[in-house]
Amino acid sequence: ILVNTNMAVTAGSDLFVQLNADGNQNSSWFYMPITISYTGGTNTYSSPSIQVAGITNGQLFLLNHGYSLIATATDPNSGGQILQTSLQVDGTTLNAVYNSGSCSAIWTPTTTATHVITATACDNYGQSTTTNITVYPAPTVTISNPTSGSILDTASNTFTISASDNAGETITGMSMYVNGSQVYTTANSSISFTTNLTMTGGYTIYATASDAKGTGYSS
């Protein structure tokens, strides 16, 4: 008996086939177990490929910032089809999409710890692939003086800024910016800078801190 099937089967598995004994649809049907075997070599299949957009390996992340992650998988095999694509952070699933090569999720980190983002794809040939992206918390930068909304005069004003590292590194430098222009820089982990303000109106002040993994920004 020649049986044609497009199901994915392996050698040694059993397939139950329903046969019509005499071509009469009203006749009795019976089941016949068939053991699958093949000769002539072994089929080999390549694993799917998967890429993640929205964040990169080694990137510094900001607390409470939403990152839009997109995992895209493709199958290199003839007749190959992606059956599932998923995104996880530290082993917890953010999203899993079936019968699709695309999966998206919003990740909002709430802890200053190193996180591992994992994207996984599997196909109809039983092949799978996984990619891991490690991200680190950015240094925390705090402007303690002046506070947001403070009213300053044009006389001498002291700016006090400090930084702390969250990735097991050492702060290697800090910079202070007023209205987008850098006004002070240091290799230390704190700034105490006194200056005169030369114009009236609003000022936007922010600072950055750097470690061996990158740069973090004040809020």
Image: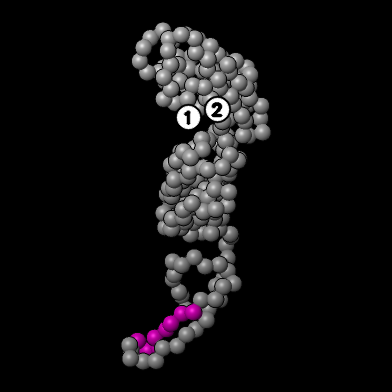
Indicate which disc, 1 or 2, sits on the residue closer to the N terminus.
2
Residues 21 and 85: in front is 85
Magenta part of the protein: which range? 16-23
The x, y position of residue 144, in whole percent, is 53, 25
Identify the residue at horizontal 51%, vertical 35% (top origin): 62
Say whether residue 184 is visible. Answer: no
* Amino acid marked by disc 2: Val
Residues 185 and 118: in front is 185
Say whether residue 126 is visible. Answer: yes
Q: Name the residue under label 1.
A: 219
In the picture as drawn, the residue positioned furthest to the left comes out as 25
Which secondary structure is most common in the magenta stretch? Answer: strand
The x, y position of residue 97, in whole percent, is 43, 55
| Residue 141 disc label | 2
* Amino acid marked by disc 1: Ser
Residues 94 and 87: in front is 94
Verify CB contact (< 8 Å) between mark 1 and mark 2: yes
